[in-house]
Amino acid sequence: MVNQTLHQHDVMLVADIPLSRSWPSDSRYWWPTSDGVYTFKTGYWLGMLGRERTWQLAFSTIEAPMWKRVWSLQGPPKLRHFIWQACKGSLAVKAQLRHRHIVPDATCQTCGAPDETIIHALFQCPLVDEIWRLSSLVSMVNMAPFSAFADHFLWMMNNATVEEFHLFSTLTWAALLCRNKALFDTSPPSPSLMVVVFCRLVKDYVEYQKKVGSTARNASCGASGSWSKPLVGWVKVNVDAHVSMGNGVRLGVVTRDHDGDVLAATVMRVRSRWEASGAEVAAARYGVGIARRFGLA
């Protein structure tokens, strides 16, 4: 019926939907929220952005490379969180505050520009001009689109080297903090000093994380090789999934005790067309089910 009713592209999408083994009854689900329950906030968000743009931001693969790059940035978690907020357009600049009816106008408090957008606050305001003018990225930054920070970020992501992109992310963070200190501190530091401080902060954090990670890997490999035994009295369940185009998905489970002895090992083939992430989740669930079936959990 699906093949007869829908176009081939839609047939593929329908075939990709994982089906529940418990066969629950259908219920209404509001897709803009993670729990499926409607909220006024998400309804307002959907109405302001429009259905297509909201769907793209939430589920489309268009922004997937961008989010992957954001959360893999080297540096403190605050840096990644700031970049994520900027890409989502949720930084508390005057234009956003006016859009949410918090302030009556969007005038920049530092230079008097009529519209303090995220792009203005991070790149165009005279307060942060020194940050970019003295950097090696000034020509590249001026070439990138200024329609939105997400567009600017994507352009830099695709055209800058790893080192240049890392510096760009650090300088935008420094620009925001420079702007905030100018607004809320009685004696704000100079932009050039902020750049030095933030570049040093990010560099020290990355070096520290590398040392910690190296120490942990050496300890793990030196102790028990690639597979570490669980504590005495515990059981470890290892799972994996393999996605084969046109040939379904294969799930594998191996359960071992604290001595490394195999307690249970099984595989299962699922006739579905899942993506790798969905297959990994299915494998984890399958592993838990096997452990329960054998009285191990």
Image (cartoon, rainbow, N blue to C red):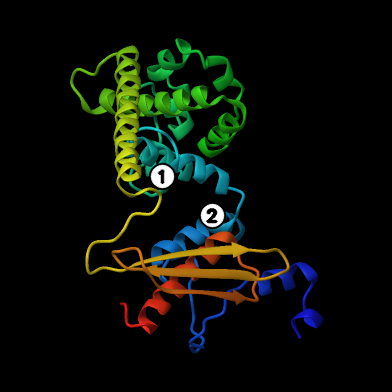
In the shown orientation, is residue 119 left or right of residue 63?
left
Residue 159 or residue 229, whichever sits in front: 229
Residue placed at 38% from the left, 24% from the top? 175
Residue 36 can be seen in this image: no
Which element type, helix, strand or loop, lies under badge 2? helix
Mark 2 is surrounded, within 10 Å at the Cα level, by few (under 14), some (14 to 19) or many (20 or more) other residues, namely few
Residue placed at 32% from the left, 15% from the top? 196
Residue 84 or residue 93, whichever sits in front: 84
Residue 56 lies, in percent from the top left, at 58, 55
Q: Which residue is mark 2?
A: 49
Residue 20 or residue 178, whichever sits in front: 20
* Quadrant in the rendering for residue 94: top left
Q: Quadrant of the C terminus?
A: bottom left
Instruction: Please name the amino acid that badge 1 sits on.
Output: Ser
Checking the image for residue 90, the label placed there is 1
* Quadrant in the rendering for residue 202: top left
Residue 75 or residue 99, whichever sits in front: 75
In the shown orientation, is residue 290 left or right of residue 140?
left
